[in-house]
Image (spheres, helix red, strand yellow):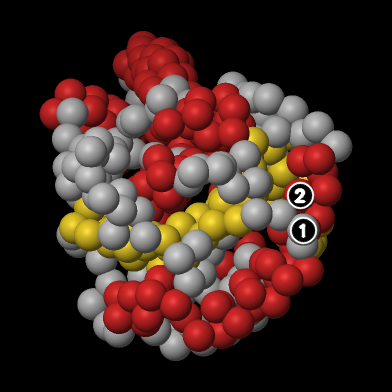
Amino acid sequence: MQRPALSLIIPVYNEEEIIAELDRRLKAFFREIDESWEVVFVDDGSYDHTPAALKELAAAEPRYKVISFSRNFGHQAAITAGMDRAEGDAVVIMDGDLQDPPEVVAAMIQKWREGYDVVYGQRSLHHGEGVFKRATAAAFYRLLRALMPIEMPLDTGDFRLMSRSVVLAMRALREQHRFVRGMVSWVGFQQTAVQYERPERFAGETKYPLRKMIRFAIDGITSFSIVPLRLATWLGLLSGLAAIVTSGWALYSSIAGETVPAWATITIAVALAASAQLIMTGILGEYIGRIYEEVKRRPLYVVADTLNLPPTDSASGREKTGKVSR
């Protein structure tokens, strides 16, 4: 089978209200480009009518391919499954909520034709997002960029085009706690940006509430930086300096014969030391927990079913040989 020029990877999770409009926008986009294509939908364990809607699309269009997880494994695992099965010379990751407009992909393809291996969508304007979410997202990306030992573009999500070489490099990275946009920066290659305005969701609710955003931020920081671990050294130095100052003051007070109630000083010193210890214990726990997850070597996702794709090993997502495509 001839390899398509373009693959779109679209993770979906409980997006029944969007599927029909997504199909319409995709087909309108494909009519405007002169490229062979495929779309790999990854159903991340949806429990609404999303699986049935995807099944209808795949029955009508063989270039629509569907990977269905056995349960919800998360957005980053869904992206990984799509990359494992996408066959295009250029592979685009985009969300299924239409906040990553399909029309922007045309500009990405143009940059790819110019020789770039990664073309990421950089948000110039956000529509439909509150001040809190925009502020916290901006702060997170700038903090992550300061902590990471590699260059990571600001104001970007997972919406990006990658050449075949980048996708093959990404397939070799199998860590459990995945931060795909950071991993794409880590593998290198020639990268550039395409500016776009991010629209609000077409329908439904965000699948990234505050709790998941915090978890995602922790995954991003701990996956690419050991700076938090170095806080232990700095806190130790500060604690030592405070101890020296306190000891000098106590010695002076003793020699001068001053009577100073000691309970406040002791309480403050103990509280500061205990909080520093607890903070660093928590940080160490995050990294040790990740070591624990990695050494178990569990698969990143489990595939329950596929449509218009060769059957896979359900535990690894890898294609079985000698089987007829479904």
Q: Are marks 1 and 2 in contact (CB under 8 Å)?
A: no
- Say whether disc 1 or disc 2 marks the residue closer to the N-terminus: 1
Please name the residue shown 67% across and 29% down the image. 151
Say which residue label 1 marks: 34
Q: Is residue 324 left or right of residue 94?
A: left
Please name the residue shown 59% across and 34% down the image. 164
Please name the residue shown 43% across and 49% down the image. 82
Quarter of the image where the C terminus is located: bottom left
Tell me which amino acid carries mark 2.
Ile
Say which residue label 2 marks: 109
Residue 232 picture location, percent across and down: 38, 21
Within 10 Å of disc 1 (Cα), the crowding (few <14, some 14-19, many 20+) is few
Query: Between residues 272 and 136, which one lies in front from this camera angle?
Result: 136
**Which numbered disc covers residue 60?**
none
Residue 60 vs 152, above or below: the answer is below
What is the number of callouts on the image? 2
Q: Residue furthest left?
A: 296
Residue 205 picture location, percent across and down: 44, 81
Within 10 Å of disc 2 (Cα), the crowding (few <14, some 14-19, many 20+) is many
Q: Is residue 247 left or right of residue 8?
A: left
Determine whether the residue tagged by mark 2 lies in a helix, strand or loop. helix
**Which mark lies nearer to you, 1 or 2?**
1
Determine whether the residue tagged by mark 1 lies in a helix, strand or loop. loop
Q: Quadrant of residue 237?
A: top left
Residue 37 vs 46, above or below: the answer is above
Please name the residue shown 45% across and 65% down the image. 62
Residue 231 vs 103, above or below: the answer is above
Whether residue 164 is visible, yes or no, is yes
Q: Quadrant of residue 238?
A: top left
